[in-house]
Image (cartoon, helix red, strand yellow):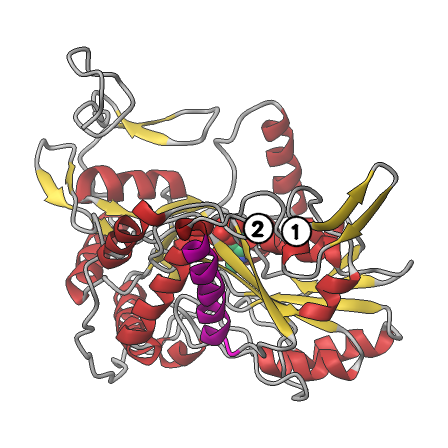
Amino acid sequence: MNVKPSTTAVQLKHVNLAYPEVIGIRNQVPLLDSRYVPQIFLDNAASTKPFQCVSNFLQEIQPYYSNIHRGKGFDSSFCTQRYQEARHVVGEFVGWDCERDVVIPVRSTTEGINLLANIIHFAPGQTVLTTLLEHHSNDLPWRRQAKVEHLPVNEKGQLSLDELERHLKASNGRVRVVSVTGASNVTGTILPIHEIAVIAHKYGALVVVDGAQLVPHRQVQMRPHDDPSHIDFLVFSGHKMNCPLGVGAVVGHRNIFDAATPYQPGGGTVSSVHLDQVIWADTPNRNEAGTPNILGLFALARTIQVLESVGMEAVETHERYLTAQLLQGLAQLPQVKILGESNPETIQNRLGVVSFTVEGVHHALAAAILSYEWGIAVRNGCFCAQPLLRHLLKVTKKQDLLCQEEILQGNQHNVPGAVRASLGLHNTAADIQTLVEAVTCIARQQWQGNYKQDVITGEFSPQGFCFNFNDLPGFKTEPSNSFYR
Ligand code: PLP
């Protein structure tokens, strides 16, 4: 049973956050009843919308775009210099050691963890220790390289540090890597990454932090290499922190990158190539095969500068206030069960990621109603964390087997899941109030549409209504125009 938090309101002061324009945050969206309303965007844990000023910066810099490194033209020299500067901005943001660490731009956190799983050397029998809280992207990449063990979490999704220590002690030095999420993308739980690092280092393991959720919402510092609480590798994604392009970064030990053959060999990764011999380039070049995402790294660095000027502490204060408001609002609804810790008094240990179920309402139906009848964008399903969802939802072995059988037959209609609302810096108290109002109606089984579920995808849509994208930008040629405007 869900333990309801005390209904005494947590006294938090709301400070209006001053932040630069976020593109498209109040787009008008159509509703089932033919009205158009400004969208309430609460799907930020998946991707955030970009800062207008970063998009402007890209427009300014684009005329000088040219490939970096060996180009001798003005533009190439300019981009090469800016690329190195951008690398520093990213490293400084997370407190790197610019001598001993390196910043490797990647497409996303997923690519970053795959990169690490491939460059960290595992001797036979060495393992990776992770947790049941992880996104699949901090689990599956490791499974290809080593045996992966998962620390359990309790019914609130919390990890025991004693359990971590017990496991490491019993493993007799077999654990090569402890890889944990900085914060759960399902429950919002923030993990004590530095305490985890102290314990992991005591047993000789490297510490990798999946910062996909944490870095956009909290000030994360890797700390000095000689500090036992140091983070060895940090990985994060720009698209979750209001950066317009698909880019992310891995920050960590230069010498470990130097000791490994490139994950992706190719142009740029070499100093010398003969038909029968290759000398790899030094890091970071050996890990940036082909043409890197130059504009992407510029965008990430500029986004970081913008976030720094807003202030990560201010972001945290603002999001905490709204998170408490959301938890308090949902706590009034007996039909709603929040996954993980639901007590607003513990918000210092969590992000504004709130996943919940509504009794008697399929998660996909609830998400559809929020979208079609309220203009609220959330996400539903398992959020790429299926083992965690099964644990939190207490899915029985029998239910799981049945579901697996249906999936094998191509039917997703019974897949367990939840609805997730995730906050960004643009969200307001009014957004949260509307969400709580909407969930209240859903909990009382009050909605307008007649929804039908697609057995194959599991998604619900209202009968007689679908979104029309014809007037939005697309790829149809305009017959009268040979050039696009
Ligand atoms: N790790 C966590 C905790 C996430 O929430 C996500 C994405 O939602 C990822 C990893 C994967 O990030 P990306 O999609 O940028 O590869």
Q: Please name the residue that numbered disc 1 is placed on.
A: 114
Q: Is residue 223 magenta?
A: no
* Type of amino acid at the residue the image marks with label 1: Asn
For the stretch drawn in magenta, the main secondary structure is helix
Residue 147 is left or right of residue 214, and the answer is right
The reply to whether residue 393 is in sight is no
The single residue placed furthest to the bottom in the displayed view is 227
Identify which residue is drawn at 21% across, 51% down: 25
Q: Horizontal and vertical percent for residue 477?
A: 25, 16
Residue 207 is left or right of residue 279, and the answer is left
Specify the label residue 59 is tagged with. Answer: none
Residue 169 is left or right of residue 241, and the answer is right
* Type of amino acid at the residue the image marks with label 2: Thr
Ligand 1 near label 2 (Cβ, under 8 Å)?
A: yes
Q: Report if the CB atoms under discs 2 and 1 are less than 8 Å apart.
A: yes
Q: Secondary structure at mark 2?
A: helix
Q: Nearer the viewer, residue 332 or 485?
A: 485
Q: Nearer the viewer, residue 330 or 368?
A: 368
Q: Is residue 93 magenta?
A: yes
The reply to whether residue 285 is in sight is yes
Quadrant housing the C terminus: top left
Q: Secondary structure at mark 1?
A: helix
The crowding category of the residue bearing disc 2, from other C-alpha atoms within 10 Å (few below 14, some 14 to 19, many at least 20), is many
Q: Please name the residue that numbered disc 2 is placed on.
A: 110
The single residue placed furthest to the right in the displayed view is 124
Q: Which residues are magenta?
A: 77-95
- The quarter holding residue 364 reads top left
Q: Horizontal and vertical percent for residue 389?
A: 54, 52
Identify which residue is drawn at 36% across, 81% down: 345
